[in-house]
Image (cartoon, rainbow, N blue to C red):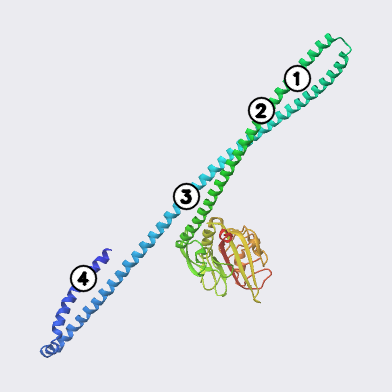
């Protein structure tokens, strides 16, 4: 900044000199003919270069002023973009807080529903107990009824016997029998009353159980409403993340409609160029390796494979460190595109592709396979990457030296897409590409 201010001051001084000289030049230009006559030609020729210099200085100052105005406009645009990012971040944080609130309400609703269910279970247990008591009372009533029938039979028998006896004894005995019958009837009435009360209590419990079921249905309705709000909030959060990805993308998904070279911003690496493909397997795939021109040497050392090499419009390898950083963010799918010499096209997919960090040798993980070509890369799974200066294979020799390319060698390989002559166990290859895409995005 200090240097710019000093340059500006110097330019202002020169501008003032130029203006004074220009004024003098304008006054004298009217009498150039007279000056040419009065002054000698050598003096006039000496002054003319100075005037030309002043004109150049003036033009330079005008150009600098234009550049400064452009710089001010650029800074204004950058500030506007920054404010947009801040607003999107605030919106994302608000949506996250609202989502947490909905989750707390859903948890509370689930707890209330569990409490209601416990109460319903308890009431049902009490109802079952009352039913057991009623069944017991009904059994006792049946027994008493049977006893009453037996008593009536005995009474009839006694009546027939008493006919033959005297009237006094018969009368006394009959009164006793009647008294016993009245006692039995009183007991039966008492049992009937108890049965009526039990049925009344059962009805009350059934009504309470129905009310509890109604409350349970209301709680379920509220939980479904909260759940739907949570789904809406999750969708809004996905949209917010999508907007943030467009401002600071970590994959090619934001560029699904615009394939080609774009920049990604991945933690630990910052911005770097990648080739995005939307034709071979759908929109938003990152090309991590490409062999289409056979004009790039893949016999490179460890450091070069770590950083990446080649041209994005021809043969290239994106770099082991970039692949590790990208696949550590979320679950990725690997898509391998193969073109045979006869023009036939094949593919292979792996649903959980990732590699480890450099300390663990960029070890390869693949997941489940499917596709139209065989599972040729499986032999390299759980293997560290090898180069001619870093031997990590199981062979007695260095496979990277023997086959002049870096790869996830076992001993030595079954498939090598970095070898000069592309190697596949069942296909005579002409071209090959390796692409990755977030697995969750494939399921949306």
Q: Is residue 384 left or right of residue 21?
A: right
Q: Report whether residue 395 is seen.
A: no
Check whether the beta carbons of the residues at disc 1 and disc 3 lie within 8 A of each other.
no
Q: Secondary structure at mark 4?
A: helix
Among numbered discs 2 and 3, the one appearing first in the sequence: 3
Q: Which residue is mark 3?
A: 98
Check whether the beta carbons of the residues at disc 4 and disc 3 lie within 8 A of each other.
no
* Image-quadrant location for residue 391: bottom right
Q: Which residue is mark 4?
A: 12
Q: For the residue carrying disc 3, how many other residues have a C-alpha within 10 Å: few (<14), some (14-19), or many (20+)?
A: some
- Circle 1 or circle 4, nearest the eye: 1
- Circle 4 or circle 3, nearest the eye: 3
Figure quadrant of the N terminus: bottom left
Q: Secondary structure at mark 1?
A: helix
Q: Which mark is residue 184?
A: 1
Q: Secondary structure at mark 3?
A: helix
Among numbered discs 2 and 1, the one appearing first in the sequence: 1
- Circle 2 or circle 1, nearest the eye: 1
């Amino acid at each position: 900044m200090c240097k710019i201010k000093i340059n500006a001051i110097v330019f202002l001084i020169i501008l003032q000199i130029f203006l004074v000289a220009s004024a003098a030049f304008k006054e004298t230009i009217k009498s150039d003919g007279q000056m040419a006559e009065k002054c000698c030609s050598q003096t006039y020729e000496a002054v003319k270069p100075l005037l030309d210099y002043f004109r150049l200085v003036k033009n330079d100052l005008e150009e600098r002023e234009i550049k400064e105005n452009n710089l001010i406009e650029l800074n204004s645009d950058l500030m506007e973009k920054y404010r947009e990012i801040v607003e999107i971040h605030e919106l994302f944080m608000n949506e996250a807080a609202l989502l947490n609130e909905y989750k707390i309400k859903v948890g509370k609703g689930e707890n209330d529903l569990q409490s209601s269910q416990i109460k319903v279970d308890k009431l049902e247990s009490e109802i079952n107990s009352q039913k057991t008591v009623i069944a017991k009372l009904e059994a006792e009533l049946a027994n008493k009824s049977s006893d009453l029938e037996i008593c009536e039979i005995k009474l009839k028998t006694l009546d027939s016997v008493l006919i033959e006896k005297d009237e006094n004894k018969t009368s006394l005995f009959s009164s006793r029998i009647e008294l016993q019958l009245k006692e039995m009837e009183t007991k039966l009435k008492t049992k009937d009353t108890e049965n009526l009360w039990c049925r009344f209590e059962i009805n009350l419990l059934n009504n309470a159980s129905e009310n509890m079921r109604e409350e349970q249905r209301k709680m379920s309705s509220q939980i479904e409403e909260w759940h739907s709000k949570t789904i809406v909030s999750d969708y809004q959060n996905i949209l917010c993340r999508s907007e943030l990805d467009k401002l600071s993308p970590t994959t090619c998904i934001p560029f699904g409609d615009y394939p080609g070279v774009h920049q990604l911003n991945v933690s630990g690496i910052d911005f770097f160029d990648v080739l995005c493909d939307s034709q071979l397997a759908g929109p938003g795939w990152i090309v991590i390796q490409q062999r289409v021109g056979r004009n790039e040497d893949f016999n490179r050392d460890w450091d070069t494979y770590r950083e990446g090499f080649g041209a994005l419009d021809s043969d290239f390898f994106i770099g082991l460190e970039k692949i590790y950083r990208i696949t550590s963010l979320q679950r990725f799918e690997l898509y391998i595109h193969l073109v045979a010499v006869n023009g036939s096209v094949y593919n292979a997919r792996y649903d959980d592709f990732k590699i480890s960090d450099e300390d663990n040798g960029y070890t390869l993980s693949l997941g489940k396979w499917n596709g139209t070509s065989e599972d040729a890369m499986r032999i390299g799974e759980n293997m560290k990457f090898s180069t001619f200066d870093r031997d990590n294979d199981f062979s007695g020799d260095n496979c990277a030296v023997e086959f002049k390319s870096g790869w996830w060698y076992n001993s030595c390989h079954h498939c090598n897409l970095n070898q000069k002559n592309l190697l596949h166990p069942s296909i005579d290859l002409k071209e090959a590409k390796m692409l990755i895409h977030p697995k969750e995005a494939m399921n949306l």
